[in-house]
Image (cartoon, rainbow, N blue to C red):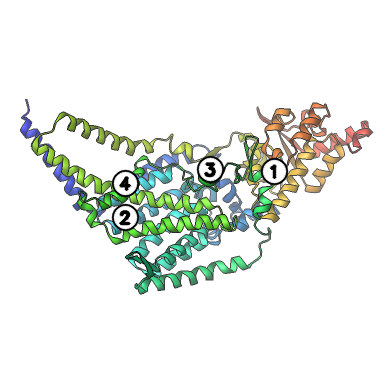
């Protein structure tokens, strides 16, 4: 049998070594572990991202599909949707993709690789920021671990859209700001301006807050000259880059006003249905607290151990946590970020839609603040906790002590491991899998100027998977720029009315006016329940009239052509060439002259 004293001695030495490692272990080791976390998540992510040929992240369907124009300028000719998303893409973002795709790399393929690199950059800068606040390498590891768990459990980073660049660029800004490096800070701000301009407002607000000191219950201007240079340089840098864009009129009109948005169903929650751009809610608690675009508490999924960040203020004040004394004054940056975020949240509400969504200033910054604060808090607490265990070992562990240590260890391990579950990562990264393979391949073989009319959900996937234009699709129904949305709405209304009108001439006129080549229909498109549930129809308040028409057995003209004209079908959809539709409807009009009369 083993000697209890020897076992106790080995355990004591192990804990002492672990305790020393927390303080003295090389930062290279801990940074290596941090990078390993990114790679673990990245490998799992790549498996999902390349599971099939027809899979794409949800938001990439908006922000990346049109970039295939960089590879082939004949794609999406005179396409309203592609033109709009190209026009609103930040200059640096689309230039970056253009540079890479000029090498012959497909932009959607590039978008699937980017998240790993963005995650690596974010991790390295998060590690560096944490060490400047508490110079213990393990702090950098815990902070970056929690950051990665938080980022990979949501779809921001993996989208490879402009907001995915926020995290590495904002963390780079914080790192160089804490180091007092003027030029790198200005470079970071410049990059923010060209990749995700809303980040610049947050950075400039932080620089403004740093112009003031709060000392002895008095607020006064800081005596640190560098802060003035940083603020002035940041303002000038942002102005040089952003003012030309602000002063240049966009071809898609101004941003919608609050008054106009409030009366549109797409912005509201009504009859148990959320609009495509849901923002307003009659319940003020939902609107101000939990609304995904309007609420201050909508923060997405976090790593469970991120809750440790809430303990940091208490750990810093308690004398029994000696490691807290090593925390640098630079920790004030976390408070400054929080104040700046809250201030911009309310300012964005005042200037609604002009500064993007109010929640975004809270959502993204808290996903940076909390991991850093949690990493610091965990190390401060763990340092004290290990000392207590060592002390208890010397006196002999009691049964309650053993239970306490076991439960604490188990909880820490579980909270650290659970966020690696694919159910919390992959399932929340919003991948869209194309199921209509034959449809994509068929359309891909059609001329590049092919235009498809459809209100089917499948129309959302056509630009990304078939590389062909769709007249409208719910995914692209964004109402923020009035010039774009008015055109989109007119197309959508015309399409919906043409799809359900019993008048053949109306259908043919629609096809002629828009130059439609194919019509994609859901097989249930003429069922009343389908119409009642179709968001795009509700969006334009057309549901009741169409349902009434169907219940009165007024047969939509287009439906009569499905059996004869369908060239491709599946369990859910049917594709009809408009050349056939026009011929059949002409026959219908000739045989039944009364059908050509307006009803």
Q: Indicate which label's residue lies in the foreground, 2 or 4.
A: 4
User: Does residue 114 appear in this view?
Assistant: yes
Callout 3 crowding tier (Cα within 10 Å): few <14, some 14–19, many ≥20: few
Q: Indicate which label's residue lies in the foreground, 1 or 2.
A: 2
Residue 553: quadrant of the picture:
top right
- Image coordinates of residue 467 in percent, x first then y, are 63, 46
Instruction: First in sequence, mark 4 or 1: give its number.
Output: 4
- Image coordinates of residue 288 in percent, x first then y, are 53, 47
Observer-nearest of 417 and 117: 417
Measure how far apart labels 3 and 1 are at the Cα level.
51 Å
What residue is shown with label 2? 130
What residue is shown with label 3? 285
Measure how far apart labels 1 and 2 are at the Cα level.
54 Å
Measure how far apart labels 2 and 4 are at the Cα level.
16 Å
Write the residue at 7% across / 28% down: 2
Write the residue at 38% across / 38% down: 419
User: In the image, 5: left or right of 542?
Assistant: left
What residue is shown with label 4? 311
Instruction: First in sequence, mark 2 or 4: give its number.
Output: 2
- Secondary structure category for the residue under label 1: loop
User: Does residue 141 appear in this view?
Assistant: no
In this picture, is 349 found above or below 474? below
Residue contact at pointers 2 and 3, CB within 8 angstroms: no
Callout 4 crowding tier (Cα within 10 Å): few <14, some 14–19, many ≥20: some
Instruction: First in sequence, mark 4 or 3: give its number.
Output: 3
């Amino acid at each position: 049998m083993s000697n209890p004293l020897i076992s106790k001695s080995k355990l004591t030495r192990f804990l002492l070594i672990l305790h020393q490692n927390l303080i003295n272990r090389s930062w290279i080791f801990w940074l290596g572990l941090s990078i390993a976390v990114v790679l673990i998540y990245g490998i799992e992510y790549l498996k999902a991202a390349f599971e099939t040929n027809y899979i794409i992240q949800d938001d990439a369907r908006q922000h990346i599909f049109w970039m295939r124009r960089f590879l082939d300028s004949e794609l999406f000719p005179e396409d309203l949707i592609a033109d709009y998303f190209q026009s609103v893409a930040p200059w640096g973002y689309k230039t970056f993709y253009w540079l890479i795709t000029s090498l012959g790399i497909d932009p959607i393929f590039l978008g699937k690789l980017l998240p790993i690199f963005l995650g690596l950059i974010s991790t390295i800068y998060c590690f560096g920021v944490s060490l400047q606040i508490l110079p213990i390498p393990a702090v950098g590891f815990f902070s970056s671990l929690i950051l990665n768990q938080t980022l990979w459990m949501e779809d921001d980073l993996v989208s490879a859209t402009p907001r995915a660049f926020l995290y590495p660029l904002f963390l780079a800004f914080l790192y160089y700001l804490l180091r007092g490096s003027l030029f790198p800070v200005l470079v970071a701000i410049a990059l923010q301006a060209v990749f995700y301009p809303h980040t610049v407002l947050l950075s400039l607000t932080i620089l403004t807050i740093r112009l003031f000191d709060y000392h002895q219950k008095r607020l006064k201007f800081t005596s640190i000259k560098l802060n003035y240079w940083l603020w002035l340089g940041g303002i000038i840098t942002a102005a040089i880059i952003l003012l030309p864009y602000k002063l240049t009129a966009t071809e898609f009109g101004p941003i919608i006003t609050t008054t106009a948005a409030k009366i549109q169903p797409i912005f509201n929650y009504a009859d148990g249905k959320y609009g495509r751009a849901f923002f307003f809610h009659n319940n003020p608690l939902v609107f101000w607290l939990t609304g995904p675009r309007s609420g201050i508490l909508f923060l997405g999924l976090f790593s469970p151990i991120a809750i440790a960040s809430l303990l940091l203020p208490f750990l810093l004040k308690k004398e029994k946590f000696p490691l807290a004394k090593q925390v640098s004054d630079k920790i004030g940056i976390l408070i400054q970020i929080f104040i700046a975020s809250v201030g911009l949240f309310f300012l964005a509400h005042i200037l609604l839609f002009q500064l993007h969504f109010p929640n975004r200033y809270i959502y993204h910054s808290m996903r940076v603040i909390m991991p850093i604060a949690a990493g610091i808090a965990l190390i401060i607490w763990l340092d004290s906790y290990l000392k207590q265990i060592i002390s208890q070992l010397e006196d002999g562990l009691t049964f309650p002590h053993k239970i306490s240590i076991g439960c604490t260890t188990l909880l820490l391990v579980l909270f650290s491991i659970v966020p690696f579950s694919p159910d919390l990562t992959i399932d929340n990264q919003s991948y869209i899998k194309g199921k209509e393979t034959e449809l994509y391949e068929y359309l891909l073989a059609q001329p590049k100027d092919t235009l498809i009319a459809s209100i089917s959900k499948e129309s959302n996937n056509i630009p990304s998977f078939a590389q062909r234009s769709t007249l409208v699709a719910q995914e692209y129904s964004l109402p923020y720029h009035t010039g774009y949305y008015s055109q989109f709405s007119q197309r959508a209304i015309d399409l919906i009315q043409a799809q359900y009108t019993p008048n053949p001439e109306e259908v043919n006129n629609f096809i002629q006016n828009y130059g439609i080549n194919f019509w994609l229909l859901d097989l249930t498109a003429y069922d009343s329940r389908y119409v009642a549930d179709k968001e795009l129809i509700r969006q334009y308040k057309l549901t009741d009239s169409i349902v009434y028409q169907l219940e009165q057995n007024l047969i939509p003209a287009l439906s009569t052509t499905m059996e004869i004209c369908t060239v491709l079908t599946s369990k859910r959809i049917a594709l009809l060439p408009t050349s056939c539709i026009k011929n059949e409807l002409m026959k219908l009009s000739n045989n039944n002259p009364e059908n050509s009369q307006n009803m």
